Amino acid sequence: MNDVGRSQDEAFASDVAAWLAENFPPSLAYRNPHPYINDAEVAASDRDFQTWLKRMVDKGWGAPTWPVEYGGGGLTRAQDKILTREMARIGAFNPNRSYGQMMLGPTLLEYASEEQKARFLPPIARGEVRWCQGFSEPGAGSDLASLQTRCVDDGGTWVVNGQKIWTSNAHQADWCFCLVRTDTSRKQGGISFLLIDMRSRGVEVRPIVLISGTRHFCEVFLTDVRVPRTNMVGEINRGWEIAKHLLQHERDSLAGNRTELPGLAGMARARLGVDECGRIDDPWLRQRLIANAMRTEAYSQTFRRVAEESAGGGVSTAVSVLKNLGASVSQARAELVADLLGNQGLGWEGEGFSEEEIEATRAWLHSRAYSIYGGSHEVQNNIIAKRVLGLPDMAGR
Amino acid sequence: MNDVGRSQDEAFASDVAAWLAENFPPSLAYRNPHPYINDAEVAASDRDFQTWLKRMVDKGWGAPTWPVEYGGGGLTRAQDKILTREMARIGAFNPNRSYGQMMLGPTLLEYASEEQKARFLPPIARGEVRWCQGFSEPGAGSDLASLQTRCVDDGGTWVVNGQKIWTSNAHQADWCFCLVRTDTSRKQGGISFLLIDMRSRGVEVRPIVLISGTRHFCEVFLTDVRVPRTNMVGEINRGWEIAKHLLQHERDSLAGNRTELPGLAGMARARLGVDECGRIDDPWLRQRLIANAMRTEAYSQTFRRVAEESAGGGVSTAVSVLKNLGASVSQARAELVADLLGNQGLGWEGEGFSEEEIEATRAWLHSRAYSIYGGSHEVQNNIIAKRVLGLPDMAGR
Amino acid sequence: MAKLSEEQGMLRDAASDWVRESAPLARLRRLREHDTGTGYEPELYEGMVQMGWTGILVPEEYGGSAFGCLGMGLVLEQLGRQLVASPLVATAVASASVLALGGSAQQQRRWLPGIAEGRVLATLALDEGDRHAPQAITTTAIRNADGWRLDGSKRPVCYGLAADLLVVAARISDGDGHDGGIGLFLVEASADGLRRTRLHEIDTRGAAIVAFDGVQVSDAGVLGAPGGAGPLLDRALDRARACTAMEMLGAAQQAFETTLDHLKTRVQFGQLIGAFQALQHRAAGLYGELELTRSAVEAALRALDEDDADSPARVSLAKALAGDTFRLVAAEAIQLHGGIGMTEEHDAGLYFKRARSADLSYGDAAFHRERYGVLRGY
Amino acid sequence: MAKLSEEQGMLRDAASDWVRESAPLARLRRLREHDTGTGYEPELYEGMVQMGWTGILVPEEYGGSAFGCLGMGLVLEQLGRQLVASPLVATAVASASVLALGGSAQQQRRWLPGIAEGRVLATLALDEGDRHAPQAITTTAIRNADGWRLDGSKRPVCYGLAADLLVVAARISDGDGHDGGIGLFLVEASADGLRRTRLHEIDTRGAAIVAFDGVQVSDAGVLGAPGGAGPLLDRALDRARACTAMEMLGAAQQAFETTLDHLKTRVQFGQLIGAFQALQHRAAGLYGELELTRSAVEAALRALDEDDADSPARVSLAKALAGDTFRLVAAEAIQLHGGIGMTEEHDAGLYFKRARSADLSYGDAAFHRERYGVLRGY
């Protein structure tokens, strides 16, 4: 980078810092953004969050790198990094993170028609519309290409019938980006990418209760749902490519979900006590804690290394590796926290357990999903074996 | 069992005990029989061992359950158990254990012609002839059915060409029982079971040096080796069934190789010291030692349980499970012993290391073979998955 | 399963039939919805009483069958398969064993027939916090004119809310904090000063906090020698541990078989997923763990029945392996079922929750690995 | 590999070329056959000197390039791939660092140019038995009229038989057994009272026992403050640890790639064995471990170069992961090669042997897990 670029960036950084100092509500500093992202009700009920959202999207920074004409900030990649860094410095976060902004937006920018971009992107950039993702089906989880939801042309309108599952927050979503089958004679080559208004007649949503009590995954039943022709992104039967691109973004974001976790040493010392040498006073748990701390640290280092190596764009093949390592590190950690709690890690609700204990227990239960969603552990291993390591397919099949 | 049977057994037991007291050389009590079994030179150089062998085979107990006419003892299964038990009581062992006695003999009894039995069994029962097993080939290790050693009929004599590998003690063997290909158009259905005199012209043996320095595995090169027609066991192209039967016996015996191992607590206490509570003073190693001791004990219990369940004969499907569990327990143990020794577990030979240390280091190196020979870990897992658990084969192959 | 006697075989088969007909997993779901904290269905427990199971460890003179630990294990294995929730272990194993092994004739007469007939639910009130720690009891029993005064709080007490009788472990004290060892006290749930609070846990086992605020116990309620009850407690605990291990093994076995069925029926990428070798090898590995665990659990139960001096180490081996194996198998059951395994509606999660809860009962795998290590000289 | 500077990239490429052309694994085999205990080939070491690698951690004023730990790591990664045996770490990392970080100007002048130019082979004489234990030194240095008198025995000393110069760690004593802390002493191999015995090990690293029987050292041979050399020793050791970790990573990477090649060419059951999913998933798992290890090792080397106060924990993380990963990969390399992998003739066994030997160098994985745990507050 030349000196002009560097000094421009420095100027930008100080502008950002000044704007953030003025506009970011201190009450939100270092708050975990996920509850706001995952739950519309939580987001709606926090006035400071709403203020912060409004200020950010007015500034265009709800979608910092999108073109200004679509409601974005028009920032360069370098500027976007500076914005992220400056936010991190004061514990701020982008309040407009959402499925729409993170997954669908970049996909529309690449594949949608001009008209579609103009129609769908600005409401996402402004945080006004919530999107959900209708990909998985009961018979097509890891094997997405087997999906069955039919979409037929009925006099210039698409008519959709089928069932989607594992649709995050469908019960709070306004719209759904959906994979549908438009040709039953081919597998990947018969899939199209369709945008469906969740208020359409024939759309029914049922939340799925998970073993952790979580209810944000849903089943979505689609019965004779009529969708305008203009809601298809890309050409008919060409949706697979779009989906793959989008899923790569999903894995990117999942792999990054758990980069920096605080150590468990403090909690363990408090729970278990220390011996006369100051070491945690349970050798069995202590060794597992140390092993997990080491893997967690090495995972964070790996995440940073991959980010550095892939700087300059493009989607890295390392994503599958990161996904599996991240999931296993996080699962081991959740398991360890519950083990640390012992009998106090059995609480579901009510008297006798602290809020933190119940949260940890439910987090432990929920952690089993880490190696299932976003491409299961097994599917990622297949990808690593074939695409990264170049191992062969079975002959004669 | 009725009372008559029981009292007969009791009488037999006391006869056996009396005979053993008179005939078993005390110098051999509680000695590890494997060096004698594995190495003809070791066996030949120990006078007490030779005495013991002579007395046992004269008694017919070198092959206790074989018919008397073939040099066996003609014992019932119950009597055989009593003999084994009485020997164990005083640390005695069958000095005639060998490939021939354990593997080939039972196979010949089941599949060979009367003439073959009369010719080959007595020398085995008397411990006069050493056999080796010519099954694996360079291109057919775990996948035995791919073997390439050709056997063709040349005017009433078989002519064999090919190469065998991993043939234990071929350099000391008088005879070899061999799988050969008599039909190239079929896989399993083109294999025959042939007995080859190792002194035949065209047989060349080269010992293979292993990473542990062991030299008892060999390569056997067969070049235009002429074998009499009468040396084929069973019908032509029906050798696969015989081999499967024999391999089952091999796995049975391998699974049982490591049933009872002494604990490592004493060695660990001596090497590592103990803390003020009397516990081994290295928490990391201590936990691995405990975990391995637990699995070792559970493995022994499993071995006894399987033996009890399958009492009454037949070859158990549990053999593959035992093989894998036994190999993993023993490998972990060998690894642990080397870890216990630390820098002293790096010695190959010479000054600065005790004999025990060098033996432990080589045993650790050799232990990697446990999960390879006698059907690799992977092959056993395939067998468990398909035959024990009934999991399906791939479709479309 | 190693060779069983004819009677043992019949016991197991009867248990298997009964569970299938009367107590399938659907019963646990129903209980979970309607549980008020007692953690069991009286109707089902009555069925077990009718089957004679509450008397398996009760001497014949008090109405039991004295059928032994292996017999009890055979029943619990079947109950474990369908995660039947009942106070059977707490009452008819742990509490019955304390009484049978260390109670006076009067105490046995007073309580054992009731346990065998199902009139009395009993449980141990032992642990006081995060972990199973029989050596770390702080509840005190202070000598006074009328006998003993108990103060302290126990948690979690399994089936503590339902129990009629509590066997309370307390530290004998002269009132000045002097440590006089462990005593066991029989306390009726109706005693003055006793207060119970429900614990709502992920698994259904009627857990409660039981607080003792100056609860008075007469000398007739003291089990064994006050101050020297540690060994008695340990013997009774070992029975509860080994029986729980068998219950866990049954549950793990069922979770494994359900998963195998799934592997044999679910199609992905045009294949039955059970045809994928990576899953086959994982299944083979789990099978090996189950086999090891079964051997260890059976050996422990037999050792207890034979009063083998090596029982403690064998029991710890069994309980530790059962804990590790059940937790592993249950986690793999969810993974191999994929998304559906994560849903409340699917059974895998119930096994997963029971695995942790059962592991923690009477000492988790880490506790028993440590105990085994000490007993074996490590 | 994270982003490298242009110079670093050139260094790595040069090392890669040199190893491929001059030091393939066949050289190690030749050395193993003819080794008299020095554990290296002078001709190959001379080549390394020519490449400038002996000076990478030597300040420029003494003929080095001061290129830093990451630079040295880049070279060692390439050497590790072909298991090149040389005293590079012992001399140009461990010993050079002690001198560069804590030597007097006179000591540096006396020894560093010789190390950079390859005229001097040096090594640490630190450990005394089974395990790496810098805190447990019993060799004594007793003050006398002429300086210090060393008594004790060191083992294993890497390249101890070949070394010209030994950096000896000894416990300062007043002669009455009073513990005065750790001192580091520069001792020439030719010193009176010094005796060396070859250790013939599974791996080739010139190991020896070095005994000191009243070896006299003048004050000019004392490094840093007598009694206070512990921190200096630890800093030098951390460099040796991180560099060894990178050498191990290179070796593990090569063993993994060789195994991948085997999976892509070996046919069994009518399939390339690399098509079997169970093996694919194991390979994917190994790949993940290698990636984690690479990140940790690079981070440790960079931390050392930046004098980051967190270096010790990062170094221990790197060395521990390298030990675990290399041992795992090497064992799997044998397993996945099947029988042929067990033969002396095949390379897998050489990697397997090096894995244990390298793990034990400068502290094995258990040592570093413990150290990491203490440093991170566990």
Image: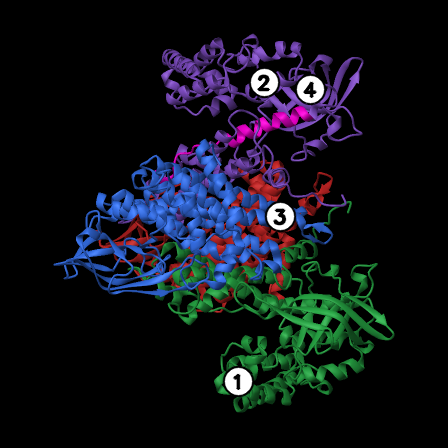
Chain colours: A purple, B green, C red, D blue
| Tags 2 and 4 on a common chain | yes
**CB of mark 3 within 8 Å of CB of mark 2?**
no
Q: Which mark is residue B396?
A: none
Q: Residues within 10 Å of mark 4 (few under 14, many from 20)?
A: many
What type is the residue that disc 2 sits on? Gly
Q: Which residue is mark 2?
A: A105
Residue B166 in the image: state x and y as whole percent. 64, 66
A394 shown above or below C110: above
Q: Which residue is mark 4?
A: A194
Label 1: state its secondary structure: loop
Q: Nearer the viewer, mark 4 or mark 1?
A: 1
Q: Which residue is mark 3?
A: D261
Q: State the CA–CA distance, disc 4 to disc 1.
A: 84 Å
Q: State the CA–CA distance, disc 1 to disc 3.
A: 48 Å
* In magenta segment, residue B171: no
Q: Which residues are magenta?
A: A241-266
Q: State the CA–CA distance, disc 1 to disc 2.
A: 83 Å
Label 3: state its secondary structure: helix
Which quarter of the figure is the N terminus of chain B placed in? bottom right
Picture mark count: 4
